[in-house]
Amino acid sequence: MADYILSCESTVDILEEQLRSRNISYISYAYSINGKEYLDDFGKTIPYEDFYRMMSEGADTSTSQINIARYEDFWRTFLEAGKDVVHLSFSSGITGGMNSARNAAASLVEEFPERKIYIVDSLAASSGHGLLLDAAADKRDEGLSASELVQWLEENKLKLHHWFFSTDLSFYVKGGRISKTAAVFGGALHICPLLNMDYLGRLIPREKIRTKKRVIEETVKRMELHAQNGTDYSGKCYICHSNCYDDAKKVADLIEERFPKLNGKPEIFWVGTTVGAHTGPGTVSIFFWGDERAD
């Protein structure tokens, strides 16, 4: 067994059972609905279906970062047990929360000078964060030390691709990403924006595509273009959705058809409440290993 703890935030958007079965610890973000705060607890308090229904009905949602004290409380138990920590953090290109993690780690290392806390900026989000974490757990189980795992993550994290589209532009208006006029115009033309995550971990609009059918096809084409070994890709593929499972399943079926050597079937997850509070319903994302993100 490794002499360190692998940890993350609840933003990994995979199953809580996967984290437990792989001996990965996590700390939860918090989100608010109409001013009432909840922990992002993998849909236990508010089921995902209810969360997105409330958003569709006009509920006001927001999120809050994890503060220094909560990170300290989270890691202190591991340090007291004589364990170092490798923490894979939510992308700094989306949130400034990693600063709190780093400050907490610096404070705890003063308290436990014989221990180490490594903070790795995943430059990833949602189930992409989860797929990177899955690979990190594999490397840990293969026997990599904490420092070796951190080196592997730094050398490989930009090979993790995120591509996604949205069929509901109203939440892009709420988040200030597009104007209300553009959303009305885009909705009338059935425009679905295609986005990805760049090398700084930021979400970047890449193309405006008319009709859901075409954007599904184009999303899978991006995987054909960027995946390791093209259509001979033999790694894992994660897919997540914000209350649009049928769309996610169409993407999964197309990927399964185009990539016969895939490591298992594409795994479909929910976009969790932290990320979903900003995307709203109607988003589908795919995650896979490919060439290095360079823009």
Image (cartoon, rainbow, N blue to C red):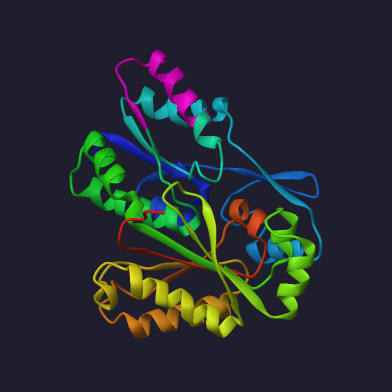
Which residue is more in the foreground, 288 or 15? 288
Q: Main secondary structure of the magenta part?
A: helix
Residue 77 on the magenta span: no
Q: Residue furthest left?
A: 143
Image height of 235 relative to 123, above or below: below
Which residue is more in the foreground, 39 or 164? 164
Image quadrant where residue 290 sits: bottom left
Which residue is more in the foreground, 277 or 1? 277
- Position of residue 150 in the picture relative to residue 267 (left or right): left
Image height of 184 relative to 131, above or below: below
Q: Is residue 201 visible?
A: yes
Residue 115 on the magenta span: yes
Point out residue 16 in the picture as x, y percentages from the top left corner.
48, 54
Q: Is residue 13 visible?
A: no
Which residues make up the magenta segment?
100-118
Point out residue 164 in the picture as x, y percentages from the top left corner.
52, 66
Point out residue 270 in the picture as x, y percentages from the top left corner.
55, 64
Q: Quadrant of the N terminus?
A: top left
Q: Residue at x 68, y 80 (%)?
A: 190
Point out residue 56 in the picture as x, y percentages from the top left corner.
76, 66
Q: Residue at x 47, y 65 (%)?
A: 163
- Position of residue 284 in the picture relative to residue 129 (left or right): right
- Position of residue 208 in the picture relative to residue 76 (left or right): right
Q: Residue at x 32, y 25 (%)?
A: 116
Image quadrant where residue 161 sits: bottom left
